[in-house]
Amino acid sequence: MHIGLIGLGKMGNNMRARLERKGIQVTGYDTNPDVSDVASIADLAKALPAPRTVWSMVPAGAITDSVVTELAGVLEAGDLVIDGGNSKFTEDFKHAELLAKTGVDFMDAGVSGGVWGLDNGYGLMVGGSAAQVERVMPVFDALRPDGPRDEGFVHVGEVGAGHYAKMVHNGIEYALMQAYAEGYELLDTRKDIIKDVTGTFKAWQRGTVVRSWLLDLLVRALEQDPEFEHIEGYVQDSGEGRWTVEEGLNNAVPMPTISASIFARFVSRQEDSPAMKAVAALRNQFGGHAVKAVD
């Protein structure tokens, strides 16, 4: 199978490498000519066999809008566009409608796995028609973790469902990171009785009910910088947590924990705190998100 991939940053470039490892031919386009296989999106369309499959892996918002609009002008009926960025699910309806005018299909894919996905595989949450999912299943199988399909891939529903599921996933992620971070700050505060904070978290990695990959990453971050002395406690939010809470409000679903974790990130922009240093370190560990270094 041969697909096009637009956006060859941290996630996109690793996805290209994993796809190629699994036997999928990839032609990539990026505005950075050093990593791009072609000079333009139009050239990308010319390089792909029909029916074309183009996966967009660019930042949500204006950049995704621009890519989808340009694709609508160069693709043909029967082609497929997959948005794998962190777009808001309501944008999927707009993009699907735009592409449908020329007979191009659209699918949204929530992708989780960060910088570790190259080797571990990516969790995939997909929205779109069953026929199109079946057509590009070799791509999803290449990207997902090895093992049973239903443990790393789900066809959630129609267009918009994939990004909706990823939105909720990231809202939960916010809350989990905040809980670990607050626990870290409390342990670190009681230096009179707690002599090994890193060791305490490490001891929780096996056999306890709070074990998780996020906990493993927190231990890794603590081993690299036990007091987070080189990280500023400033944490950005990329949108999905806010959207999750908005959906909770719109549907009368109480979300006190996820809501609190988002407001905690706002606190981080007002004062430096050990807990928010831990959250910043976690985001850097799993997603390669930039941190503000302490001078």
Image (tube, rainbow, N blue to C red):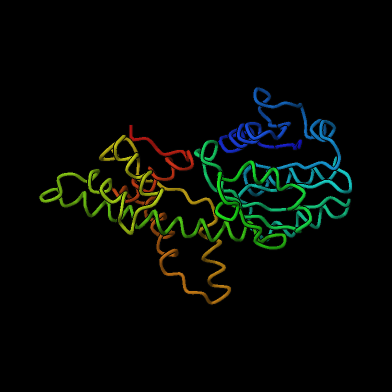
- Outermost residue, left direction? 192
Q: Position of residue 67 (x, y in %)?
A: 74, 42
Q: Position of residue 208 (x, y in %)?
A: 30, 56
Q: Give the quarter of the figure containing the N terminus.
A: top right
Q: Residue at x 40, y 45 (%)?
A: 282
Residue 15, placed above or below residue 80: above
Residue 53, how many percent across, how many down? 77, 42
> What x and y, as percent, mark residue 139?
69, 43
Q: Is residue 269 left or right of residue 249?
A: left
Q: How many marks?
A: 0
Residue found at the very far bottom of the displayed protein: 252
Does residue 169 appear to the left or right of 26 in the view shown?
A: left
88 relative position to 151: left or right: right
285 vs 86: above or below: above
Q: Quick one: which residue is furthest to the front in this view?
A: 148
**In this rendering, position of residue 119 left or right of residue 138:** left
Res. 54 image quadrant: top right
- Tell me what residue is drawn at x 46 percent, y 38 percent: 290
The quarter of the picture where the C terminus appears is top left
